[in-house]
Image (cartoon, rainbow, N blue to C red):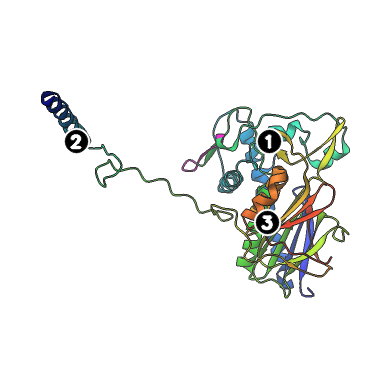
Amino acid sequence: MLTRWLGVSALGFVGLLAGYVWQSKPGRSTGQGVGTSAPTPKAAPVPQLDTGGGEALAPPPQAPLPAAPPAAVSSGGS
Amino acid sequence: MNEIASASFTALGTTAAVFVTDPHRLAAARRLLEQELAAIEQSCSRFRADSELSAINAAGGRAVRVSERFMEAIEVALRAARLTGGVVDPTIGRALRAVGYDRDFDAISAGRSRPASGAVVAGWQTVEVDKPNSSVRVARGVELDLGATAKALAADRAARRVENDLNTGVLINLGGDLAVAGNAPPGGWRVRVSDDHRDIAAADGETVSIRAGGLATSSTTVRHWRAGAGRAHHIVDPRRGTSASVVWRTASVAAGSCVDANTASTAAIIRGNEAAAWLQGLRLPSRLVHRDGRVRRVGGWPRTSG
């Protein structure tokens, strides 16, 4: 029983050691460390569009208000 | 609105109008608008063989170098697609032709009826934009149409140029798609909202005032035609490749810009039963007219008396 326990422990230790050595190679990371991974290329800057460039459809600064006719301007199907 | 001056003319197959709060700026404002419209038509018209859009559609899958103007227009169109879950899609050109919208609308309405079919829409994700090399590519057989965003983009650009260059309050109206910039007149810009932008006294419409941003209306009641035994209209549902089912015959939306307003109003028609909740979630003031004429207001659209 003791021999079997020692065998399993030794195998586990060797496994942990191998994992540590593998992860220590340059460019490898589990994603948790900082500075262990190769530098990632910067994303291309998103162009600032002149119009409608936000990442959501933008509400108006002020909602339309009720108004009395007549109106000089018309919005309808075209 | 006594001090407002305006001019209107025909462009892009519809009525273009500019309103300014400083009447002395009207002539210059009209020139700026005409420049913007000429530029957008040269870049984005589906009915001009010499436009950049036509060159891309005819390129057989090759990349085509484009102007800054077209690059802006295609990026605005792709953003609209992204923000609407793909229901406002610039790759519907072939489907539009299949439903019968294959020439200027005046020619369609005067022409002979023929059955409408549909076409598979490739999807906006297939458009390849190479910004560093100023080129755009679509796969062979894919056809772009920027109708849902290009006109609104021209309205936004023109309004901003008039405000910046001429220092006047301005409203641009392109066939019912409105962009506002600068100081509004006292009481705001009064706008009649209805099914048809040509009917400013429509009994079934209502009047609101706006001060900034954009307001757009999409409707299936004007640009439609007989197609065999049925009827087709110009708003294509890219999921089906045919004219969208009509739940709402007209959708008017106010937003931060004309592009965003027209993107949302077009998406509302296509989304049908889901439109009201979607617009409410985005806090976009909207007026939806059901096909039976009932009106639904969401997102803070006001209740008006007439």
* The stretch drawn in magenta includes residue A47: no
* A71 up-or-down from B262: above or below: below
Which numbered mark, 3 or 2, is in the foreground of this view?
2
* B37 up-or-down from A31: above or below: below
Which numbered mark, 2 or 1, is in the foreground of this view?
2
**What number is the disc on residue B93?**
1
Query: Do pointers 3 and 2 mark residues of a single chain?
Result: no
**Which is more toward the observer, B198 or B72?**
B198
Q: Mark 2 — residue?
A: A20
Residue B305 drawn at (x, y percent) = 83, 67
Which residue is depicted at the point 85% across and 48% down? B292
The part of the image, by quadrant, that contains residue B1 is bottom right
**What number is the disc on residue B295?**
none
Chain under callout 2: A
Q: For the magenta stretch, what is the residue range?
A: B126-133
Q: Secondary structure at mark 2?
A: helix
Answer with mark 3 or mark 1, whichever residue precedes in sequence: 1
Q: Mark 3 — residue?
A: B155
* The stretch drawn in magenta includes residue B127: yes
